[in-house]
Each structure stands twice: as structure tokens, then as C-alpha cells.
Image (cartoon, grey):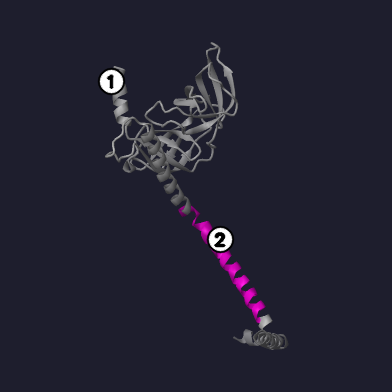
Amino acid sequence: MQQIFNFVIRNKTFLLFLLLFSIALALTIQSHSYHRSKFINSANGLTGGVYGTFNSIGQYFNLKDENTILAEENKILREQLFNRTWMKDSSYIDSSYSKGKYTIRTAQVYKNSYSLTNNYLTLNKGQKDSIKEDFGVFTSKGIIGIIDNTSNNYATVLSILNKRSRINAKLKSTDHIGTLKWDGKSPFYVQLEDVSKFAPVKVGDTIETGGESAIFPKGLGIGTIDSFLTDVSGDTYTIQVKLFNDMTNIGTVYILENGDRTEIKTLENHSNE
């Protein structure tokens, strides 16, 4: 308290000036409409700037929640798109049929390897979320891989950057099919092999899923043709595909369940006996 008194005594002249100046300013603003309007506008601008700053800070800390909401909305829209496309292409038409063929779930990547020979991702969804082996995994840009193993709370994904990976893929422009593999070199490129020599292959063309499996539907993005060469036999092409996804930076993913997967697998197994 004594220090406050000492401060006031030392600065009494300056403090008196501030007091008189404030009174004069207040009287001026009060008695002149022009000055009053300018003061109000300035005050509104100041408070608006302060509120804007706090709002920006709040939005920053809410980004995680907003991203979760957006991912859920995208999941619903993609599920509707897949099922609408399937129903349009299907020869089975029944007005009483309401259950969609495809179900999509969102997940977050907990671990992602991309510099090994056989790379995997770990997701924060597992058996309790109805995740099973051979479910497809993709992002808004393109495919990521296939569910390989599951525990109660987690799942591992066989990445497309895995030398064991084999995925049916095709040229978007012509529907010529091939097998998508990885040569173990760059995380930004995969290879499409066994494409017919009669296919009109062009640099820049899009490569997408072929739909000839029970995992991925037709038309999911993979990448674009970077280069290509003819195999030794001269009958097929090997195509260098630049991936749409940056496989070194994967966050939110979508897990795709084909409702007919079990039936298709059972039928195929019986046919191979």
C-alpha cells in the first residue's frame, strides 16, 4: 500500500494531467455528435478485432472436432455414392430392397511405415467396430491398402507400399486391366503390370480400381501414368503410376466393407476346389 502512495506522490502531476485530459475528452465526445460517432466506431473496431482474435484461437483448438465432423459427413456421402452407383449398375432391381451393399467407417492412422520392404499402417478401429480382414482402406484421394489383421481395438493395413500387395486396377480411359504391385523403391510410385499391349497407354492418364474383386468397387482413384515400358515378352506393359496419395502423410482414412464379400469369397473358393 505504501508503494502505491509513493507512486501517486511521485507522479501526481502526470496523473492529474491524465485525469483532466480524460475529462476533457469525455466532455468533447459527449457534446459533439461527430466526435461521439468516431469514438463509437473506433471502439467497435477494437472490440471486433479482439473478438475476432479470440474466435480464431477457438477455431484453431476446435479443428480436430471439425475434421471429425467433416470425415463423418464424407463417409455418409461416399457410402451413398457407392451404393447408388452399385444399384444403378446392378441387374437386381427390387423396390423393397433398402440395405446398401457398401458400408464405410472412418478411422485414424496411429502408425504408418513407408520406407520398409513390406509396409503397414495401424488404425484405431478393430473388431469391436466390426472391422474384419480384407476390408478396403482409402482416403478422399485414393486407395491405401487392405485390412490384414485385427484386434479388439485396432487393425493393421497391408499398405499398397508392400511387396505382398496385389490389387486389381485398370486404365480409366479404356478399362484395360492389370495388377497393381510395388517394387519396393519410392513411396510415391507403384507399378501396374500385365496390361495388354493393345491398350492405348498415355502419360498422364488415370489409373483406378478395376472392380474385379470383393474388396474395392470399380473406380476408386490410385494415381496417374508417369511412364511405361513393354515387358521382355512384348505382350504387356509395365506402367509406372504416380500415386494420388502422399503415403508418407496419412491421417484420416475410410474403411470399406462390401456386404457381399463373404458370399463372393465362398463361391470363389468352391469354384477353385
Mark 2 lies on a secondary structure that is: helix
The residue at which mark 1 appears reads as 270
Q: Position of residue 244 (x, y in %)?
A: 54, 35
Residue placed at 35% from the left, 39% from the top? 131
Dividing the image into 4 quarters, which one contains the C terminus? top left
Q: Are marks 2 and 1 in contact (CB under 8 Å)?
A: no
Q: Quadrant of residue 271?
A: top left
Label 2 neighbourhood size at 10 Å, few (<14), some (14-19), many (20+)? few
Quadrant of the image containing the N terminus: bottom right
Q: Nearer the viewer, residue 65 or 149?
A: 65
Going 52% across and 13% down the picture, which residue do you hit? 235
Q: Does the magenta stretch include residue 125?
A: no
Where is mark 2, residue-wise?
Answer: 56
Looking at the picture, tell me which residue is in the foreground, 74 or 19.
74
- From which residue to which does the magenta span run? 36-65
Give SS at disc 1.
Answer: helix
Q: Among all residues in the image, which is located at the extreme left?
A: 96
Q: Is the magenta stretch mostly helix, strand or loop?
A: helix
